Amino acid sequence: MPTKVKLFLLLIGLLVLSGCQDNSDFSTDIVVNEGSSKESAETEESVMAESVPDPPKPSEVPVNSEEEDIRYHRVDDIDISLSTHRCQSDGENLYLVYGSAGEPDLYVMPIGADEHMRANIDNPEGMVVCHIAIDIYGKKHILVAGNDYEEWYIWRLNDSNQVEEAVDVSDYFETKQMAHWFLVDKEGNYYLQWVLSRDGIIVDREGALKHRFTLESLETQWTYEAAVGKDGLIYVIYKDDDARVRIGEFDVESGSIIKEDSPFYFTSDEIFDGMSRGTDTNILLFSRYSGVWAYDHEQGILENRVPLSDMGLTREAESFPLTFLPDGRFVLLEGGKDGLHIKYIPAGK
C-alpha cells in the first residue's frame, strides 16, 4: 500500500477517535447534569417540607375519676357564681370571666385550688372582658368590649395570658348586647349567640363575617346550649315544633343546624345548664333536673351517666354549674351552711 494512502487512513482513524472522545465527554456531562437537577429538586422538596408546619394536634388530658369537694375562699369580692357559661378549662386551670360590667381582667384558678387570682392581662385601655373560649388545642380566646360597648374585639392569648392577636368584630354588633355563647371550632371559626334573642353570628379566624342567624333561619323554637364537641365541631341543643329537645351539629359554612333523623331526644321539660366536649363521647351535658348526660351520635350513645342523686344534689339545691374539665369531670359551685364549695364530679371514661 502506498505511503500516502497509509497516512490518509491513519488521519481518518485519528479523527474518528477524537470524535468518539468528544461524544463521550458530552454524554457524561448530560448524566452529571441530570444527577445535579435531581439532587436540587430533592433539596427543594426537603426545604419545602421542613418549612410547612405540622397541623396542630388537639390537647390530650388523661381521664380523672377522682371526686373532690373543696371549700372555696372568695377573694377580691368576686362572685364566681356569675361565671356560669363564662368558665373554661385547659386541663390545668379554670379560667373565669366575672359577670360584672367594667371588669377588665380574666381570673385564673388552678384545678383543685380553693381561690383564684387575676390573669393580669396587659390591658391599658381597660377593655371589658366579657367571655372566654378555649379551643380543642388548648388556646385561649377572649371577647372584650370597649368605648361603652361600642367596640368589640376577640383577643387570642399566649401561654402567659397576654394578647397575641386582636381581631376587630365591632361591625357585627348592631346593638349593645351580651354574647351568651362564645365558641371557637377546630378551624378557628367563632360562634357568638346573644342572650335574649338567641340571634347570632359566625365569624372566621380573620374576623370576616360568614353568617348571621336567627331562630327563624335555624327553623327552631328555641336553643338551650351550645358547645364544641370532641371532634372540634359546634353542636347546639334546640327545640323543634314537635316540642322535643335534640342535639344537632351547627354547619358554619351554611349557618344552619344539621337536623338528622335520630332516636335520641329529650322531653321539653329537661333544662340544661352546661355542655362541653367529652372524653369517650363527643359531648357531655348537665341538667339540674337529671344530672350529667353523655351523648355521641356516631356511637349511638345517649345515657344519663351521673344521675342527680349520685351527685348528692337535689333540684332545689343552691348550685351553680361552672364547666366540664378536659379530664371528664364536671365542676359545680354549691352553697352550704359553711359557705361555698367547689365540687369535682367524675363523668368521663
Image (cartoon, rainbow, N blue to C red):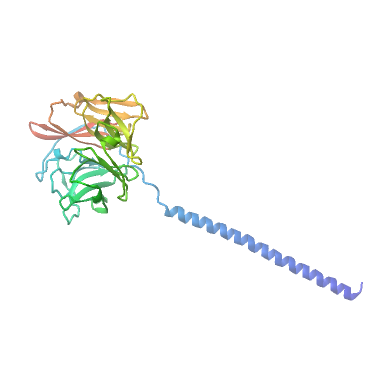
Q: Using the rendered image of the protein, determine whether residue 277 is visible from the camera's viewpoint.
A: no
Q: Nearer the viewer, residue 6 or 332?
A: 332
Q: Nearer the viewer, residue 242 or 156?
A: 242
Splitting the image into 4 quarters, where does residue 297 fall? Answer: top left
The residue lying furthest to the right in this view is 1
Q: How many marks?
A: 0
Residue 75 percent coordinates (x, y): 10, 44
The residue lying furthest to the front in this view is 216
Residue 193 percent coordinates (x, y): 24, 40
Splitting the image into 4 quarters, where does residue 133 fall? Answer: top left
Relative vertical location of residue 120 with respect to residue 321 in this rendering, above or below: below
Relative vertical location of residue 113 with respect to residue 145 in this rendering, above or below: above
Residue in the image at 15% along x and 26% along y: 315
Q: Is residue 129 left or right of residue 254?
A: left
Relative vertical location of residue 18 with respect to residue 168 in this rendering, above or below: below
Residue in the image at 77% along x and 70% along y: 15
Residue in the image at 8% along x and 33% along y: 338
